[in-house]
Amino acid sequence: MRARIYRQPKTAMQSGQANTGEWVLEWGQSAPRHLDPLMGWTGSTDTRSQVRLFFVEQAQAIAYAEREGLAYDLERPTPKRFVPKVYSDNFAPGRRQNWTH
């Protein structure tokens, strides 16, 4: 079972970058999940898959994994490309898209 180290992405409900600076170390699923016949809940004997460790920096997460002897996969975040938008560009004479009003 390998650990996964990644930077926490923003949720679909937010437009800003708040709470996205933390690095997360989590383990994959090593035991299959099973259905409880009485209640229908999904359960597992693997308790490690429920643990998520949060770190301020990437180096701290890597140091923890190496100190504990964990095999890990590092997922680097894709760089964000900021495209500035100006409201007056909607009415520019050299606009490439159709004006929809």
Image (cartoon, helix red, strand yellow):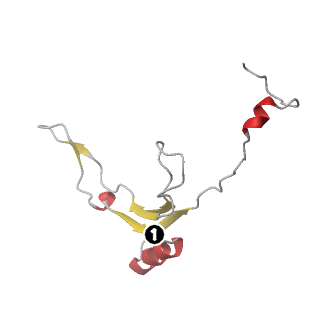
| Side of 64 where 95 appears, left or right | right
Residue at image location 48% in from the left, 42% down from the top: 12
Which quarter of the rendered picture does the C terminus lie within?
Answer: top right
| Side of 43 where 75 appears, left or right | right
> Residue 46: where, in percent of width, then height?
27, 58
Q: Is residue 86 above or below residue 59?
A: above
Which of the pair 10/38 is nearer the observer?
A: 10
Residue extending farthest to the left is 38
- Density class for disc 1 (Cα within 10 Å; few <14, some 14-19, many ≥20) is few
Residue at image location 83% in from the left, 29% down from the top: 96
> Residue 55: where, in percent of width, then height?
44, 70
> Residue 89: where, in percent of width, then height?
78, 36
Which of the pair 43/55 is nearer the observer?
A: 55
Res. 2 in view: no
Residue extending farthest to the bottom is 67
Residue at image location 39% in from the left, 57% down from the top: 28
Q: Is residue 14 above or below residue 8?
A: above
Which of the pair 57/98 is nearer the observer?
A: 98
Which quarter of the rendered picture does the N terminus lie within?
Answer: bottom left
Mark 1, secondary structure of its residue: loop
What residue is disc 1 on? 71
* Quarter of the rendering containing residue 37: top left
Res. 42 in view: yes
> Which three-letter amino acid code belongs to the residue tagged 1?
Ala
Residue extending farthest to the top is 101
> Residue 24: where, in percent of width, then height?
44, 63
